Amino acid sequence: MPIVFREVTLYQPRYPIVDAHSHGFEHEKHFVEMANRYVSPRETLPLFGDASVQAANDTMVRVGIYLRILKNLAAKPTSVPAANDFALRVDLQYPNLAPTGTIYLDYEHNEAEVECLAEAGIRGIALDSCWQGFHVNDRRLADVYRKISAYRMFVLMHAGVDSNAPPRDVETWPDQVLGAKDMLPDSIVIAAHLGANMNLKLAKNYRGVQGILLDLAWLMECCQGYGVYSVITWEEIAETIDVVGPGMVIYSSDYPWGDPGAQIRFWEEHLPDEA
């Protein structure tokens, strides 16, 4: 699978921007190994920057982003401590990056990990059923969710299809997000990809729910015909935003998969000011 590195488009937005969902890897080899394992060898994978944490930090100034949430996961229970140590290192080194911590179903030290993260200043937790292989509304998460909510940490969740994820057959849809939110009463939940990637009609289920935000990660690319995601049209995106209300929608780049400069310009041209 060829990886093509591209430059981020220079753009200065009307207002300072928070990027609620991005990625950065400590070592390029980790990213390349992951991409080669799960992305079709027939696909070309375009990246903006080089997928490193340093690039995630350095590109912010080019596009008017002043705070960037860095999604950080553990792919198995035994990886939770290492993933969270990575978040702590990034948080110390890069003041404008907000790395998430992570948990894993049935990992015996989840609550202690959350407490350590929160006391150190980490502001959020990331979950991704497609990559982690468990449902975010599993009742066995209730105790650690209670701890997360007590610290008022946000929770960033992938929602919908991820065609490049390993074949775990576990996806997160609005019912699962809403079930998790019930166990996270004092946390903001950010549901990625408008909360229902590849099936935006389901996003209507979020309407009127307090404490949930829907991010725009990779949606510009969807309606501009990038690969398999071209099945989503601009009309579907606009209708979804109209149904849930623009106040529920938050910008996310999904960097390095997306070009934040081009995205921010696109959203400023297309979205109402309330978003």
Image (spheres, rainbow, N blue to C red):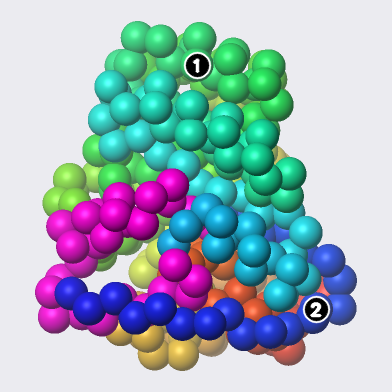
What residue appears at the point 69 percent right and 84 percent down from the top-left corner?
10
Query: Which residue is rendered at x = 46% and y = 90% of the image?
Result: 224
Q: Which residue is mark 1?
A: 113
Quarter of the image with the C terminus in it = bottom right
Q: What residue range appears in magenta?
A: 22-50
Q: Quadrant of the N terminus?
A: bottom left
Residue 208 left/right relative to 42: right
Q: Amino acid at mark 2?
A: Pro
Residue drawn at x 79%, y 80% as measured from the top left: 12
116 and 231: which one is in front? 116
Residue 121 sits in quarter: top right
Q: Residues within 10 Å of mark 1 (few under 14, many from 20)?
A: many
| Measured Cα–Cα span from mark 1 to mark 2 | 37 Å
In depth, the one of 105 and 209 nearer the eye is 105
Residue 58: quadrant of the picture: bottom right
Q: Quadrant of residue 56?
A: bottom right
The local crowd at label 2, few if under 14, some if 14 to 19, many if 20 or more residues have their Cα within 10 Å, is some
Compared with 231, 91 (above or below) is: above
Residue 136 in view here: no
Q: Nearer the viewer, residue 12 or 51?
A: 51
Tell me what residue is drawn at x 29 percent, y 23 percent: 77
- Where's residue 199, x and y in %? 38, 67
Whichever of labels 1 and 2 marks the residue nearer the N terminus, that label is: 2
Residue 13 is tagged as 2
**Residue 62 visible at all:** yes
Could you say whether the residue bearing mark 1 is in a helix, strand or loop? helix
Q: Secondary structure at mark 2?
A: loop
Answer above or below: position of 201 versus 101: below
x and y, in percent, of residue 19 in the image: 66, 60
